[in-house]
Image (cartoon, rainbow, N blue to C red):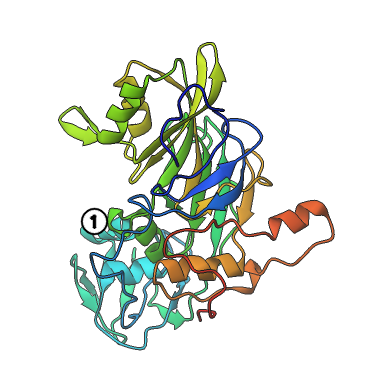
Amino acid sequence: MTKHQPRGKKKSQLKPRAKGSAQGTYKGGPGGDVRSGAKAGGRSGVKPTGKPPLQTPADLALAAATQRVAGGEAADVPQAPMAGERLQKVLAQAGLGSRRDMERWIAAGRVMVNGERAELGQRVLRSDRVQVDGGKPLRAVAANHRVLLINKNEGVVCTRRDPEGRDNVFRGLPRLKTGRWISVGRLDINSSGLLLMCTDGELANRMMHPSTGLDREYAVRVNGELEDAAIARLIKGVEIEGEKHAFSDLRYFNGSGMNHWYHVVLMEGKNREVRRLFESEGLQVSRLKRVRYGPVMLPPWLSRGEIGEMNADDMRALYRLLNLPVRLPRSVQVRQGNSERERKRARSVLIPYPGLTPGGPPVS
């Protein structure tokens, strides 16, 4: 994204600056669909080579999975050629949840190894007998993973179980024979836009972890207009309740009267961070829509409330970017349809992004 444009220029013209974040180019109105991508460098992409890049693990250990509460059948899990992987990582690779979720399961005593309560950080071997919630011992199979894109509506929560009984993003997802859907980050109940779901806990963990350096872009409508000095402050960083917050990029889009649209980029997307940053300058956010997560854009063909699936080529490119191994199920292969809508759905949902090299050799 670029810095705030002077009022004399056409505000709706979106052009990437030389050193900005990777971003999509928006057409058709504020908060609209992403039509194309612009490659850019800077601090909002995958971090530059000052630190060693993320490495693929030298081996995959025997992943463990089982029934959640009842049913009595063991879940399919990936087989590891080598031994000695951390238990929480093994469970995440099986698609039971993110690594943090698995750590909580282990701490709560839900996981047993060789008949004994597992400990956080414990390593497991191929020969170990791993059980979750007292289920049957596990069997090893190849791992096949999928990635979904959801255009979330406002009023929908991102929790599996809501005490108030509100609609949640997990309802209506495709049923899985093994594992479960894992949310890559969250959006609060009053926010809309792109939400990713996957069956690979390692992918979810890698995308969400701050050290990976994937940024998030939002379209924001506020009840007023920021002065240039305020924009500079929000990019430089402001202290809110003893903690520094900042946009890595912020740009005016368009608007009139009391309603004005901005596009902003964050590196982590902490709870209510966008809203709190605008509130620090006396403006209230009336609409907030995520339009990009790292290299994944909200595609124009995905209507509000709809679910789409990432195709095989995009999954390979995404896994290569994050240095993760991947095995793809047949169901992720998107066939070219005859209708215009089917052809659109077969298109890539990735934009050019620092470190992302589409068209490379397939990953098995």
- Name the residue: 18% across, 34% down: 243
- Name the residue: 66% across, 70% down: 333
Q: Is residue 243 visible?
A: yes
Find residue 136 and report its image quarter.
Answer: bottom left
Instruction: Give x and y (percent) for residue 203.
Output: 41, 63
Residue 55 appears left or right of 219: left
Q: Residue furthest left?
A: 242
Pointer 1 residue: 108
* On screen, residue 332 above or below 58: above
Quadrant the N terminus occupies: top left
Find residue 256 and report its image quarter.
Answer: top right
Pointer 1 local density, CA inside 10 Å: few below 14, some 14–19, many at least 20: few
User: Is 106 or 353 nearer to us in this picture?
Assistant: 353
Residue 157 appears left or right of 117: right
* On screen, residue 243 above or below 182: above
Residue type of the residue flagged with mark 1 = Ala
Instruction: Give x and y (percent) for residue 363.
Output: 50, 79
- Name the residue: 50% across, 32% down: 166
